[in-house]
Structures are given as structure tokens and as C-alpha cells.
Image (spheres, rainbow, N blue to C red):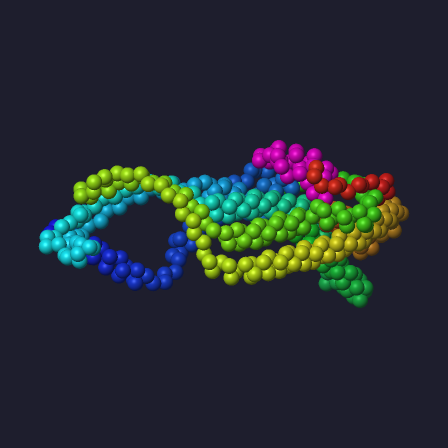
Amino acid sequence: MVCNIKKLKQFGALAGLFLLSACAVSPEPNKMADIQKRVDFDLHYIFSQQEEITGPLRLEDVIARAFKYNLDHQLKLMEKALAHGQLGLVKKEMLPQLMSNAGYTLRNNNPGGVSENLTTGSIGSSNSISQERDILSSGLTFSWDALDFGVSYLRAKQSANDVLIAQERKRKVFNNIITEITEAYWAAVATQRWLAKIDELLITAEQALKTAQKVERKTLSNTLDNLNYQQGILLTIQELKSVRHDLKEKKTILAARMNLRPGLEFTLEDEEMDIPIPTLSETIEELEMQALLNLPELREEDYIAENNRLMARQRLLKLFPSLKLNSSVSYNSNKYLYNDTWLQAGVNLSYNIMNLFSIGSIQETKELQEKVDNLRRQSLSMASLAKLHISLQQFEIKKSDYILSAEIADVNNKIRHHELGMKLASRSTGLAVIRTQLHNLLANIKRDQAYSKMLAAYSRLKISSGEGYKLQGLGHDLTTLSSQIGEMLDKPQEDLAPIKVRQSASR
């Protein structure tokens, strides 16, 4: 008796302690050491796992690095892995339940009592007990609910669709990476090609400016002519520095696309920009149909609509009665029991009558959800068609800009060679020669920039028309991944309708 009272007091003291500790919680900001630890972890994760750059990078190498190390792509990979994990969990929910239990109870006195005779109403004169003060119990219960099985099956189908949704989102990210990298890569190639020549021309212009300023100080020439000359040189220097800044920014953007540490130096393979200009052989109606069939956004909407239909079926399924089968084996340490171990089985059928009032609302919600899904898909289809037409117009504009820029650069090259050959300038650092070199340099830079924009516009057109790439089976190491991407850049995905392309001979 005394021992049991002590045990109850101990339990009460522990309960009071837990109650007081819950009331003692107060807001506490993160410590600087914890924040620094988080920063170090993020920096280590972002940059330390990348393979070292050992040579000039080709277009497929850059895409492979962006595909492997791009954080947005890694997020989509994790979302896909999470969807696979959730599918496995939901599948296990369809299995029957096997529950084990164990318990211990005690009380400070005997649970005794008297009994009453149901026939005579007389109460027994002696007290008796049928249960011990301390009882240890355990059991193992097997149960299966037919209604829960049906709901879990529909949830598993939803999770399977979530895996396909994650796959479409991954394909969309990959397509966007290719478009962004294509423009950034060729712009960075132009930077690498012309940056040194810009620096050379800057040195020449700055030397000419110093000479003109020296002449002015010695008043050896007409002041107004000299000032006009200096103004021309200064404007040239300003334009050169502006172009140089823009070009250097292109390479920084490419480094960010590859998720490289800012400031890390790398070189690109100086590929010739002589790829024939692609032209589309399909009609706009064929491109529209291909886009509506293949775009990842629209395929994702199909899976979302299917999940919504499965959700409506779950709501309807829950209106049915619940049929539950169960069996168990149990043990109880009560010494007054005739059998302390026993088997038990049963079946239970239950139904919530109030569900009858929900049938109409569930049906209305189902119909309204279908209308919303259809309207959202149709709205997205309209936006996709508009995007396709805009992409086609942009491609034609960028292609025209490139052709014109190439012709201007060709003419400027001829003028430069002609003027240098005829020696029209009286001195190598003269303003006319510097301006000629500047115009020639800018013309070539604009041609290369127009080339990168044309290829990016063509890539956007392919994506807008639904053309994609086969993502399954890609390697994990950069060498294999780069080789596979190099092979697949002009190869459409097997289950997608490809765009027929013919290449013109003119540039």
C-alpha cells in the first residue's frame, strides 16, 4: 500500500515537472555561431562537389555542368526522388495493419466490490476482487479495412502521377537550361574572342590621347583642332570601355549558369560561328498541334486533372460503409483470470449516416473541379500558342538581324583592309585609324552577338513548339554526360513529335 502511494506521488511529480517546462519556453534568436555554421555548410555544398575544369569548355560541356550543378535542376531531382519515396509509402498504406501493444497499470487499493442478485435483488454480504492492483498486458492485432484499402489505392495512383509530374518539371528545367546556356555560351565565346583586341585598341587610344594632351600643353598645334581630336579619342575610349564591360558580363553570366564560384577563371573552345541558319519546314498549324501535344506544362496539367478526378473518387468512396476484419492474440497478467492468453477474431461493419447529406455537395464539387481544370488547361493552351507565335516571330527577327549584322561586318572588314592598304591615315595612332578599327571591332562583335541571340531564339522556338530531349539514361559523371548531351542536342525525344528542320546554305 505504502509502496503504491509512493509510486503515484513520483508520477505526479514528473507530470508537474513536464507542465512547468512547457510554460518556460520563450523566443530565442539564432546564435551567430549557428548562422556561420549554416553559411559554411551552404558554401561547401554549392561549390566543393564540382569537378575541376581542366581545359577549354565546349557547348555540351557547359550544358553538362549546368545540368549537373544547377541548383534549380537539383531541386527538381530531389522533388522527383521525393515523389518516388511518397509513392512507396502510399503503396505500403494498402497493406493490412499489424499492431502490437503492451501496457502496465497500477492502483493504490484493491478494485473489490459486491454483487447483486438479479432475480431477488439481494446484495451479497462479502466483498470480493477479480483484478490485481498491478497488471501487465500485451497483444498483437491484425486488421484490414476494405474502405481504407480502396482509398489508399487511389492515393497510390495519385502518387504515381506525382512522379510523372516531377518528370515533366525536370524536362522543362532541362529545356530552359539549354536555351539559357546556348545564348550565354556563344556570347561568352564572342567575349573571349574580342576582349583582347578591345584591350589592344584601348591602349592605342589612350596613347593617342596622351600624345594629344602633351601637344596641347606645349601649344604645338591649333587648340580647337586638338580639343576636337581629344574629344573624339575620349568618346572612343568611353565606347570601348562600355563594350568591354558588357562583354565581361556575358562570361560572368555563363559562370553563374554553371554554378561556378564567382571570379573563377575558365576558357571556352573558340568554335567557329559558321553553323548554317536553320529554317522550319513545318507549317504553323503543325507546330501548334505539336506544342499542344508535347509541352511539359500541358502534360503536367493532364496529370493534375487526373489527380483531381482521383480525389473526387476518394470522396465518393468514403460514402460507402466501412468493413473491417480483425484478429488478435492477447495476454494479461491478472492472476484471477481463468485464461490469461486468448485468441480473438471479428468483423465490423459501420456507416456514418450523416454521409448521406454530403452526396450532393461532393458531386457539385466534382463537376466544378472538372470545369476549373478544363478552363485552366485551355488558358494555358492559349498562352502556349501565343508564346509559340511570339517565339517564331522572334526567331525570324533575330535571323534577319544576324544576316544583316554579318553583311555589315563583312563590309567593315573590307573597308578596314582598304583604308590600311591605301594608307589614308597619316599616322598609326590617328583618330581616323582608331575609329576605323573601332567600327570594324564593333561590327564583328555585334555579328557574333546577333549569332548567339539567333541560336537562343531558335532554341526557344523549339521548346515553345514542344520539342524536347530524352532525359532517361543520362550519366552522372561529367565526361559521359557531356558526350550524351552532345549526341542528343539535335535528336528529339523518342515519344515526342520532332520538328523537321532543313538548313540553308546561306548565312
Q: Position of residue 342 (x, y in %)?
A: 28, 39
Closest to the observer, 370 or 119: 119
Instruction: State yes or no: residue 480 in magenta.
Output: yes
Closest to the observer, 15 or 373: 373
Closest to the observer, 11 or 51: 11
Q: Position of residue 44 (x, y in %)?
A: 48, 45
Q: Position of residue 46 (x, y in %)?
A: 52, 46
**Does residue 211 appear in the picture of this structure?**
no
Seen at 41% across and 43% down, the residue is 325
Q: In the rendered image, which quarter contains the C terminus?
A: top right
Q: Residue furthest bottom?
A: 224
Closest to the observer, 307 or 15: 307
Seen at 60% across and 52% down, the residue is 309
Seen at 40% across and 47% down, the residue is 348
Seen at 64% across and 51% down, the residue is 301
In this view, 240 is above or below 478: below
The stretch of residues the image draws in magenta is: 467-492
Relative side of 181 to 148, left or right: right
Q: Quadrant of residue 122?
A: bottom left
Instruction: State yes or no: residue 112 in magenta.
Output: no
Q: Position of residue 176 (x, y in %)?
A: 66, 48
